[in-house]
Amino acid sequence: MSSLRVSATAVPIPHAWEAAGRPLEAPLRVSALALSAGKPFCFLTSDTLEVPADIYEEVARRLETEAGVSPDRILLCATHSHHAPSTIDHLGMRRDRDFCASLQETLVRAALDALRGLDSSQSGCRLLFAESQEATVGMNSRYLLKDGTIAWYAYAWEDVIRPTGPYDPDLPVLAAVAPSGETRAVLFSHSVHNIGTLSRETYSPGTYGLAAQELERQHQGVTLFLPGAFGSTHYTGGFGATPLPYALTTAERVYRIVEAVKEGLDRAVAMDVDAIQALRRPFTYRLRTFDEAKEAATVQRWAEKYTPREAASHCRAFAEMRREMAPVQGEERQTWLHAIRLGDIALVGIPGELFAHLGLAIRRRSPFRHTYVIGLANGTIGYIGDRKAYELGGYQLWAGWHSRSEPGTGEAMVDQAVAMLEELAA
């Protein structure tokens, strides 16, 4: 009989939503899934754009102090909803301090609730797994345009030549099932930006958060969405100035994602999980160096051609980031990589928006049959592109805090992640 115990919870993030001036179309939540087959492990997700490194470090410190769970046994990621109060201080946005304080407390509360729930959880739970797929909602959005630039969000479809990289459509599904047959929790991942609301000008957990809450209504158990290697991918037809004939509404995307998860649940099979192994290792990188005049000209040319009404504000936002970064160019920084083994499945926590090319490289080189990347895990260093992508350019790799690491960082991250996986497999 399995010794696995499971406890899961979802907690709305308290905030003065009415005073914020926008309606809330669905709760913004922190969701936690605690698993124990010996030592406990906790997955934490938040319906925010990012979880800043300082919040992650404080949450990890408190969980170690209050629950005795070390940081290597906690993976915390944001779902990357673009429809929550700001948790960042760049790209023209300023961190909502009250919301972030509430987020931090909710992360701690949800994790503690889930971890403490393991004490009353009946052993004998099963962990089921299937690899599903959803290949119709996403695309590699880094299109090469006729003028030689890389598409961002304002372009005409007739100007598109081709995508400049791959897209990973695989959608892993894990389900924690009690001895009674009750689904306690569902965890799924997909590699597309979490953008899209059902109504305009609302706060929302975004397309994937809406899908998670719909799955809960249909399957009862707490559902967590973990983003994959999504740095180079967006929704099909989502950003063209001229709508594509096959562009999907948010409601249709939610439906297709839910159906893909359900398809996985229908054929998921039990895994042998005698223990949950985890490694969390420091990863050292350098802040990029850049030519100020060249970067300024690149942003200006793009903005004046594609978004003339917003050109001045775009130029100011990126210039402000470059001014802040200029004195620290080339500085060495540290972040974290995380590798987790659940039976024959491996998860790799990456602190940023990894490009699909790099995520697929990790999966291809992994010693495990099933390996998946979890983005925005345990902090973030922004977009992480491959060397070719840096050469091509584009918004994601303009110099700024959203793209702070030097070329080659992604390849070095892949190498270290694979070494960590090989250590887990030994």
Image: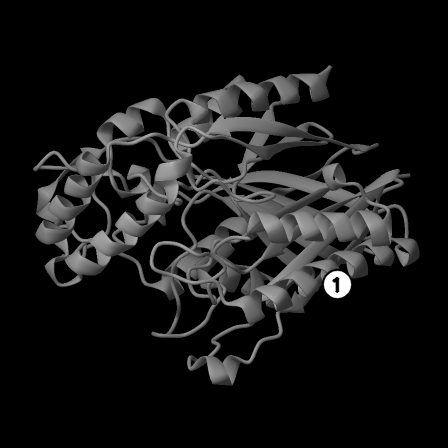
The residue to which callout 1 is attached is 109
Image quarter where the C terminus lies is: top right
**Residue flagged by tag 1: what amino acid is it?**
Arg
Q: Quadrant of residue 373?
A: top right
| Residue sitting at x 49%, y 84% | 19
- 132 up-or-down from 331: above or below: below
Whether residue 265 is visible, yes or no, is yes
> Percent position (x, y) of residue 325?
38, 41
> Percent position (x, y) of residue 222?
68, 60
Q: Residues within 10 Å of mark 1 (few under 14, many from 20)?
A: some
- 287 up-or-down from 184: above or below: above
| Residue sitting at x 65%, y 61% | 104
Direction top: furthest residue:
426
| Residue sitting at x 9%, y 46% | 158
Whether residue 404 is visible, yes or no, is no
> Percent position (x, y) of residue 241?
16, 57
Image quarter where the N terminus lies is: top right
Q: How is the image coloured?
A: one colour
Q: Nearer the viewer, residue 14 or 2?
A: 14
Q: Nearer the viewer, residue 376 or 318?
A: 318
